[in-house]
Amino acid sequence: MSDKLLFKDIDEPGLNTLGVYEARGGYESLRKALRMTPEEVLKELETSAIRGRGGAGFAMGKKVSFLPKGTMDKYLVCNADESEPGTFKDRELMQKSPHMLIEGIAIASYAAGTNRSFIYIRGEYVFQADMLDAALAEARDAGYVGERILGSEHSLSLVVHRGAGAYICGEETGLLDSLEGRRGNPRLKPPFPAVQGLYQGPTLINNVETLATVPTIMRIGGAEYAKLGVETSTGTKLVSISGQVQRPGNYEIELGIPSREIIYGLAGGPPPGREVKCWFPGGSSAPVLTADDLDVPYDFDSLAAVGSMLGSGAIIVVDDSTPIVDVAIKLAKFYRHESCGKCTPCREGTNWTVKMLERIDSGEATPMDLDIMASVQEHIIGNCLCVLGDAMAMPIGSMIAKFRPEFEAHIEAARARNYGEIASPADSTDSAVASDLALVAQGAIDA
Amino acid sequence: MDKGVPRYAHGSRVPGWDMPADLEKDPARIPDAETTPVPAELRAEIEAHMALYPETRSATLPALEAAQRVHGWCSPEAIEQVACVMGLTPADLAAVATFYDMLDTEPVGRHSVYVCTNISCSLCGADALLAAIEDAANEAPDGEALFNVRSFECLGACDIAPMASVDGVYVGPLSLEDVPALLEDVRAGRPVLPEKQLAKRACADTEANG
């Protein structure tokens, strides 16, 4: 596809400055939107049927319409805490085309009737936050942000807020707590942020890519945008592809193309001589898919149909040279570190999973541990305030389901390597119990 | 098992878990401006941040970050100063500081070297890279004071894996041969590995640029 919407001439020198952005038709969409009523702008967003690009895939127009009408303080928050492993699309957008995001925020705030907005950007993105700050200063001077934008009745303040390193702050309610100056602990939902969010006021939270698409929707019209992609997944999507591929990076694709085209066509596939073993279609929180799933169309519903998700649009490819246990340990350790500790199933479940995986890796486990581990995952899912625990449980659960023989072989090989061929080591309780049971069965121990 | 974890009474990892709370203790107070000197520049910066939000508490993260820049870490003194300016108790701020990875609640080396060791980077050799950087930093006589080398979770630059964020500047893809030059650049105060900086990298999508 040659019609890039977000990535059109993304590397044009100076695109991050107001002059170049305006020369390319920048802020025309904002002018157009301000000539319409907020209801008409909202109608365009709903017609476009764009689904949120941050992970959950919720229809953006619907989210905007959930905000109550009235004169209370309402807020718009742009979630730029891109920290889902494998995702780096927002980084490229904010660094190279920050005005596109600012324009999108201005239009969305007009449609939603919010006068205060914040961009919560992760603290690690120093350069990107500097770019946004510089662009925001230009936009303010030019009257695109501030009191009575371009002579209209709409006013908007915008603040770039830098985080300080916490994955959980990408979760919308954790983000709100963090933005209020607290630890980033998620909140109970409902009430949803659209009803009671930042400072207890109605709050619209959208991902960077979603908001950056808004100027395009206004320019070409919601109906035209909806023609791109497939029926339930309209438009184009930025895909971050990384891991064991030859050309990792960000690509803009039309939703619904075969996943193989992205992994092999755009990113060049695994290194020569290697095959795809498994791949995460939407960040490390998505259940893994295997080489058999490469022809699944890359859109929200097709990926959900095969038991995974599009998530943030980050594909991580693992080739056949990597043991699945290594991937699982990395993953579980990450979620253990990032669990905020508020809910027990997540705090303890992530820790147990790491310990069980380490036992598997050292040969102290038995195949029974795989069943226990799978049941731990099942007990995490759906039992916490937010989905951080689920985000570990889903991929780990899918790995056990799809690669069980490899896990078992790994246990056997590690045991033979570390403990010789004799039964289980005595210092591992579960294994000791299992071997005792085996001896009981043989009649060697009097039960 | 994590044998390196310090253990307290009854094998607990939490010191004093079995001691009753001291109900006689004075409640935490907001530090007195008379007895808490705050550098004027730091005070001005924190107050500027506070003015940006409807509720001043929102400035906690930028304020702690500013104090860390001045003091090198979120020391008790730094937290005391922020608490004084923001009108919060030091406990409020310490609770926040311990939550976030980029706020250091123990003294660290002057220059941060965060090595991403998440899935994509580790698939491309990040663990060996981290070990090499740690070894090289430890070998230097002033390494501990100069470098704050640590693994970090997905820095959002999997396209340049394996990578590191050196004082906030993203560099990659790094090979083991880059390690001496990287540390040398930091030591000399030069831009780090200019040819490997992410900021100069073009988009991977070849059709994106006409």
Image (tube, rainbow, N blue to C red):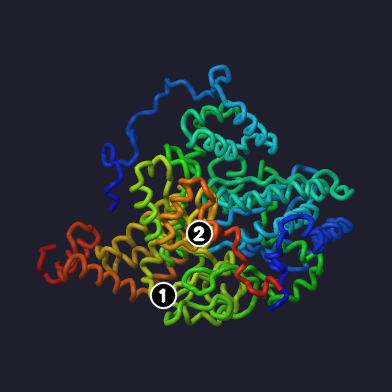
User: Is label 2 in contact with label 1 (beta carbons under 8 Å)?
Assistant: no
Q: Is residue A308 visible?
A: yes
Left or right of A426, for residue A348:
right
Q: Are marks 2 and 1 on the same chain?
A: yes
- Label 2 residue SS: loop
The residue located at (73%, 49%) in the rendering is A136
The percent position of residue B52, horizontal first and vertical second, equals 69, 38
Crowding near the residue tagged with mark 2, few <14, some 14–19, many ≥20 C-alpha atoms within 10 Å = few
Report the residue marked by disc 1: A402
Left or right of A383, for residue A348:
left
Amino acid found under the numbered disc labelled 2 = Gly
N-term-proximal mark, 2 vs 1:
2
Report the residue marked by disc 2: A382
CA gap, disc 2 and disc 1? 22 Å
Residue A279 is marked as none
Amino acid found under the numbered disc labelled 1 = Lys
Crowding near the residue tagged with mark 1, few <14, some 14–19, many ≥20 C-alpha atoms within 10 Å = some
Query: Is residue A266 or residue A204 the one in the foreground?
Result: A266
Query: Is residue A315 or residue B77 the one in the foreground?
Result: B77
Q: Quadrant of residue B202?
A: bottom right
The residue located at (63%, 38%) in the rendering is B58
The percent position of residue A76, horizontal first and vertical second, equals 71, 50
The residue located at (40%, 59%) in the rendering is B129
Q: Quadrant of residue A259?
A: bottom right
